[in-house]
Each structure stands twice: as C-alpha cells, then as structure tokens.
Amino acid sequence: MPGTQQTLVLVTGLSGGGKSTALRALEDLGCYCVDNLPAALLPEFAQQIKINPARYSRVALGVDARSPGRDLEEIPTWLEELAAAGLKCQLLFLTADVNAIIKRFSETRRRHPLTSDQVSLPQAIEREQSLLDGLREKADWVIDTSDINIHQLRRQVWKCSGSENETMTIVLESFAFKRGVPQDVDFIFDARILPNPHWVESLREHSGMDQPVKDWLEKDSSVKGMLTDILHFLKTWLPEFQRSQRSYVTVGIGCTGGRHRSVYLVDQLASGLGSTFGRVLIHHRELQA
C-alpha cells in the first residue's frame, strides 16, 4: 500500500528461548520471515527489502549468537541506520532462566549451538547470555518464556507487535473444556449445548473444518442460532474495544473435545468478522497441539 511504512522485526535471544515460535507467530500476522540470518547479511538484506516494499511490507528476521561477536555488536547501529532510511525497526528478545533452557534441550535432545566437547550446556548458556547482553539492553520487547507454553508465547508476541495505530487484532481460539480454559482470553463461549458430531461414527474422525461435519451441524437450527448470536455480540462490542485503542482481543470457543463444534464456530466467525475487522487470526488449540 503506497505510503505505508515498512516494518522490520529482528527476533533474537537465547537458544531454546522460543525464537522459532515467535517467528511463526509473526508469520501469522503477515510478516515475511527468515530464520538464522547471519548478522553480517542484515544491511544487504535490508536493501532488498527497501527496493520491494509491496512484497516486504512486514519482515521478521531471526538472528542468534552463532553470528561472530563483532557482527552482533553492530546490530543496534545497523538498525538505527535502517530506521534513518525510513524502515520501522523493532527488536524482540526471547529469554528464559537457565533451568528452563536446560530442561528444553534435555527433552528435545537437540544440541545447543555453542556447546562442544570442551563446553558444557550450562557454560554454553552462560556464554550466549554474555554475547547477547547488549542486544537485550537495546530490545523494544523482552519476553521471558520460562513459565509459559508455546500458545501463551504466540499471544504475547501478537500483543507486542500490535499498535494502537494499526488495525485491532482479533484471535479466535477453539479449545476443549476437558483440557482447561486458555489463559488470557477476553470472551469465552460454550458450545457444549450444541449437538455433538462425535457421537456420529462416520464423523468422529473428522474435524469442524471438514465438509461432512459442517453439513451435519448446519442442519441444526441451534447451531445457526448460536453462531448468529455470537457474531452479533462481537460485531456490536469489538468496535468499542477498537475505539478504546485496544490492539488485541482474544475470543475462546469451547466444546467437549475441541475438534468439531468449537472448530466449526471459530471458522464461521472468522469469515463473518473478516469483512469488518482486517486482522482476524485463528488458533485451533486441540488440532495444533
């Protein structure tokens, strides 16, 4: 869109801190994402972004401590130069405490990029912290992921990257009540009162995104009634959140298993809200777990 300022989000932080999850969350917001870019290539890549603003209106780059130390030290200066040239530059830093990172590497059996035969995992983490301290001090946002799961991290990234001057982001999340209610939701609607496709053997293995389940649910007037009522409620009150400069609202739709009724309603609500609100994100918790 002509006249729109291009945005470059640099995502960095400790290995095991959640950089990959953060980049996927930014991709959901429409960012063109590149992971593990050597820091020395940042200026050249930024030039490519600038000459193609239509394709690269929002870009997120992942950089880690494997870049040579001097290149890491140059990142704040490079970002300042890019900002002076007209790009909106932001720095997102992901961190976690040492015990959480050790546990994650133990569970995934991945190798920390700074470990070797002579360097243990705790030593590598300490070394990485030292290398990245300067970037953490310059960060626009610092997210500590020690005690949050990937779904909560995605929501935090979405909140950080929102702006009161941009379109409000609406997250529609389906979930199973038997696995607990999601945290940080603003509205929750209970679809367990609706007829359940789980009890139809031919539909059990399908989800609410599949046409046979959609057709079956749409035959019942109560499904249409609930969908109409929730859509009317959201269209009535979400503009009030927007006028109050709220940048992010989460709506949870729950059913028993989180696979049929809630998934169907979330997808239908997204279609109904999309024409009114520009940024609607869908998260099917149980399908994506």
Image (spheres, rainbow, N blue to C red):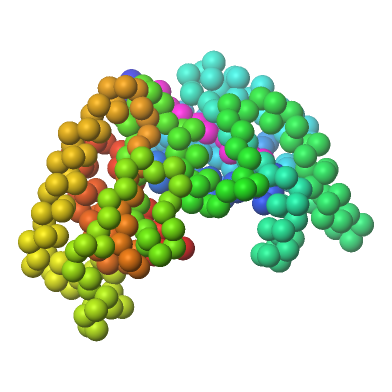
Direction right: furthest residue: 118
- State the image quarter where residue 143 is shown: top right
- State the image quarter where residue 63 is shown: top right
Position of 232 compared to 180: left or right?
Answer: left
Find out whether residue 7 is within the magenta segment: yes
Direction front: furthest residue: 193
Position of 256 compared to 104: left or right?
Answer: left
Q: Which residue is drawn at 22% across and 33% down?
A: 237
Q: Where is residue 110 in the image (x, y as percent from the top left)?
A: 70, 63
Residue 26 visible, this angle: no
Q: Residue at x 9, y 66 (%)?
A: 220
Direction top: furthest residue: 84
Q: Where is residue 222 in the image (x, y as percent from the top left)?
A: 11, 60
Find out whether residue 274 is within the magenta segment: no
Q: Where is residue 139 in the image (x, y as percent from the top left)?
A: 63, 28
Position of 134 compared to 37: left or right?
Answer: right
Residue 45 visible, this angle: yes
Q: Where is residue 76 in the image (x, y as percent from the top left)?
A: 66, 25
Q: Which residue is drawn at 87% across and 56% down?
A: 120
The tally of labels here is: 0
Direction bottom: furthest residue: 201
Q: Is the magenta stretch mostly helix, strand or loop?
A: strand
Q: Residue at x 89, y 61 (%)?
A: 117
In what quadrant of the picture does the N terminus appear? top left
What segment is highlighted magenta in the picture? 4-13
- Nearer to us in this view, 200 or 189: 189
